[in-house]
Amino acid sequence: MSQPTDNRHASSLPPVAERRRVSETRHGVTLVDDYAWLRDENWREAMHEPELLGADITAYLDAENAHTDAHMAPLAPLRQALVTELRGRIAERDASVPTPDGDWFYYVRFRESGQHPIFCRAPRTGGADTPAGEPLPDEQILLDGDVEAEGRAYFSLGTVNHSCDHKLLAFALDERGSEAYTLHVRDIESGEEIQPPITNTTGNLMWSADSATLFFTTLDDNHRPCKVWRLALGDAPEAAELVYAEPDPGFFVSVATTQSDRFILINAHDHATSETRFIDSASPWDAPRLLAERIEGQEYDVEDDGDDFVMMTNADGAEDFKLVRTPIATPGREHWQTIVAHEPGRLLLDHIEFADFRVRMERADALPRIVLTDKRSGQNYGEDHAIRFDAEAYSLGVDPGYEHDTHTLRFVYSAPNTPDETYDYDMGERTRRLRKRRTVPSGFTPAAYVVKRLHATAADGAEVPITLIHHVDTPIDGSAPCLLHGYGAYGISEAAAFASSRFSLVDRGFVHAIAHVRGGQECGYRWYANGKLEHKPNTFSDFVAVAEHLVETGYTHSGAIVPHGGSAGGMLVGAVLNQRPDLWGAAIADVPFVDVLNTMMDETLPLTPPEWPEWGNPRDDAQAFETIRSYCPYQNVSAQDYPPTLVIAGVSDPRVTYWEPAKWVAKLRAHKTDNNALLLKTHMAAGHGGLPGRFTALEETALIYAFVLDALGCTGESAGRATGREAAAPVSDDRIY
């Protein structure tokens, strides 16, 4: 297979970025950073106003972008063909299944060619037979995303939340990609804004029961959500009253409500510990009460049930979590009583308390399931039953809706070869009704694809799950290229879900695989614990073991595998490029967290103190310093061959600051011994989530796929094998990471 090289447009290569060097000695080791100058002193301001970025840094990033554009210019026809393919799999006119609340149905829809969602409601009468994507009878448009986006360079909505009396709509708007949201409140009938905008928030907001008070969270100077406020509707933002301020810079705060809407919850948490305060929503100006004081390494998640709180917690050695109940009047730990015992290997993921039923999401054998408990008095009281699914690999999601006293549970099922199916499940009758099946307008036949769940044996004997999909016509003789996705951090599990975008590769003969490496929770909480802190290297060795297993079993071959990951998954990509460059034919690192050592030593950065429980604190802990230094992609760049690599960043990104990928690329360019393509694409006015808009985002997907296909010499036409129909999700999330 041919590989593009930087010689294709050598004249457009940016200059090597060696100007201001920074050195620091920590734990007896001197770190020299040749590319520290790429961190602008005004980066906080530039995150919100990119034009404030220093001229020299802007010029450098512009030169990198020009180099990327020049390299990709010959692939313009392929990129356009990919955009057409990707768009052809999205139903342009689409809508979510309406969700009942009081006298109304609430739903989201898209218009033809619409980039952004339209939030709507209609009277809770009729409309059951309305075709998908069409407005319900007597529809009211609450918020038109396409209209709101007009004239804005960047547009992204956070929370959109109607008031309990159904008269008002609060929504959060990010105009920079920096995840600093402005809150707005509108009168639904008149469309007028009745609240002065509230700036510098996280986009997290809740209503009181009387719809007269807003609760919201704000960011500090280090971009951390640290304060909860309440504001009487209509008052100036300056009149807001501080409800809670978190003193520990390692904890973030948020507000939520229980399913019954009876309580406002104020949550403080890092990656290992949580603490909750509560306020009766009917008395929103009361002082918050502490449910249970924080204990390091213990988490709890709160719902209410009659006179009790019900909590999911890992307290008392319940590594995979259990459910307990405690009186609302005396909620302290001394009153906790177990109602669902801890069962090793069965990880509790979530729980919902409806009036008559308890719902819990759990994972066992690396697959999710939904379990329901009947709380009604009678012969089924206290009985559990699970909703069954028979696929080898699949994904589940629960939508709790707005109502508490309901017997209907909505869930969404999909599999790598099964488009999203939305069901309403009668919890009393134990029957399900299909409400919507995602359609793929250009056609899709599930039987044309093979889905497998495999296991690779890691170096220490751990069995690492793999979910893969390929076309039935793809030969499994070692000749196929493979895109191998991984993440492995924060306990986030990679779902075996449907994503229509990946078929632009699968239909061209690729095997698409997900490596469920340690650091996620696919195999329980211990799977997560064994991929963090001092065990973080397991994440990378697991990924390599998966790649080697796919070669050994004939799914692909060395030099034809493309590791792909975003954010912490981008760190994974950087680490395995350093460790095993021979395995990879190309690489995609999206907003990659590659300068982890320097970042974790800088307590002024937004996520650093809250993430010490995840990575370790190399400032104060010599062992954490050495562990991170051993795998940090930026620290371990060496004089060796690297595969063609595409790196994507965003100036407005508060999670992975733009200079991390920029510095990494500069160091790679200076040290690598090959002529393979090395491209950096920096969005100068976007953040961690990339380009906004459901169709604009496809351009970035097409850029990634065109780069991969070119790197592996697979730039021919799609096999066009997919036929039949499937359905488009109401809010498409077809990003490929």
Image: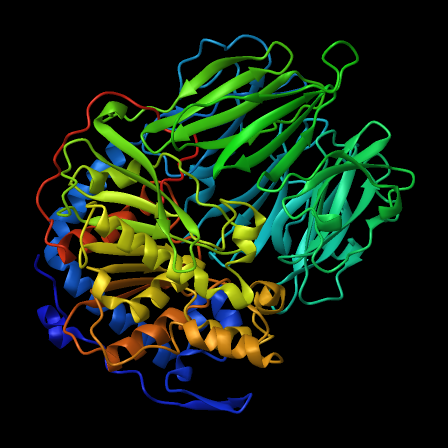
Relative to 639, is 277 on the left or the right?
right
Say which quarter of the image contains residue 708.
Answer: bottom left
Left or right relative to 182: residue 434? left
368 to 204, vertically: above or below: above
Above or below for 271 versus 658: above
Residue at x 22%, y 60% (from the top left corner): 586
Looking at the image, residue 109 lies above or below residue 557: above
**At 24% from the left edge and 64% from the top edge, which residue is drawn?**
645
In front here: 507 or 538? 538
The x, y position of residue 114, in whole percent, is 36, 34
The percent coordinates of residue 526 (x first, y second) are 56, 52
Q: Position of residue 653 (x, y in %)?
A: 46, 62
Residue 550 lies, in percent from the top left, at 26, 49
**Residue in the image at 32% along x and 69% along y:** 579
The furthest residue to the front = 461
Q: Confirm whether residue 42 shows in the render.
A: no
Would residue 12 be found to the left or right of residue 97 on screen? left
